[in-house]
Amino acid sequence: MANVINVNLSETNYALVSDQIRTWSQVGESRYICIANVHVIITAHDSYAFRKVVNLADMVTPDGMPLVWMLRLKGVKGQTRVYGPTLMLHILEMAAREKIPVGFYGSTDQTLQKLILRMSELYSGLKVAYAFSPPFRPLTEHESTQIASDITVSGTRILFVGWGCPKQGKWMAEQKGKIPAVMLGVSAAFDFHAGTKSQAPACMQSIGPEWFFRLIHEPRRLAKQYLYNYKQP
């Protein structure tokens, strides 16, 4: 672990994360993983409650290049980016190979249908045990209990959560100990892999200005978020 603005980041890579998830999921452990970019770090910096959620995660991977650079400056010389959408593909490939049931929680019904179709075509033998698009409002206590029960009954052992920051982190923290699965907050990865949104070119991802590509494609949603992050000390 290395601390960046009071948030603990894991020193890891795709292979290590995939292996750890395989180990946890095969025995049905309840765990959650935060995939942290600059927005997650700033949100955690400004909110003690959310910072606690992130720091209590079983793993916090460095999603953005600025965080990779910070870890390298702190002496983690071999640190590379663990980009959420790419990590999701590594995990799905592993799950298909190991016959570990997966689930998807978040986004819209239409996106989930496209996502499942594409991922099932890409990874032969992938078992999708659960998929659910939650309502865009706070869940009632009954709904939360029912969702946790449905996921458990489905046999899902790896649950991808695409609900955005900070909502997905808070939800995963609340479900730890209730759902016998490894939960990963992957934000926009559902849309990228379903083909409903475009990812930045690999060259932009590797040098840092990926945020600019996303801002161009989603100005109304991201302008306020990016401007706020830019203003923070």
Image (cartoon, grey):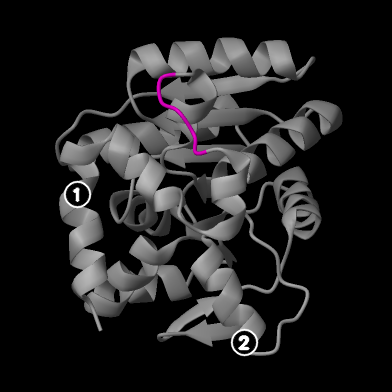
| Depth order, front residue of 119/232 | 232
Location of residue 202 in the rendering, given as x and y in whole percent from the top left corner = 62, 42
Instruction: For marks 2 and 1, give the CA distance.
Output: 29 Å
Q: Residue at x 35, y 15 (%)?
A: 109
Q: Which of the 4 image quarters holds residue 43?
A: bottom left
Location of residue 161 in the rendering, given as x and y in whole percent from the top left corner = 45, 40
Above or below: residue 9 compared with residue 90: below
Give the main secondary structure of the magenta stretch.
loop
Above or below: residue 18 compared with residue 75: above
In the rendered image, the residue lying farthest to the bottom is 74
Quarter of the image containing the C terminus? bottom left
Crowd around label 1: few <14 · some 14–19 · many ≥20 (10 Å):
some
Residue assigned mark 2: 73
Disc 2 marks a residue whose amino acid type is Leu
The region drawn magenta spans: 196-200
Location of residue 177 in the rendering, given as x and y in whole percent from the top left corner = 49, 56
Crowd around label 2: few <14 · some 14–19 · many ≥20 (10 Å):
few
Q: Residue at x 40, y 42 (%)?
A: 213
Location of residue 114 in the rendering, given as x and y in whole percent from the top left corner = 49, 12
Residue 85 numbered tag? none
Residue assigned mark 1: 223
> Can residue 163 be seen by looking at this rendering?
no
Indicate left or right for 1 with 223 as reference: right
Indicate left or right for 118 with 50 as reference: right
Q: Residue at x 34, y 51 (%)?
A: 171
Q: Earlier in the sequence, mark 2 or mark 1?
A: 2
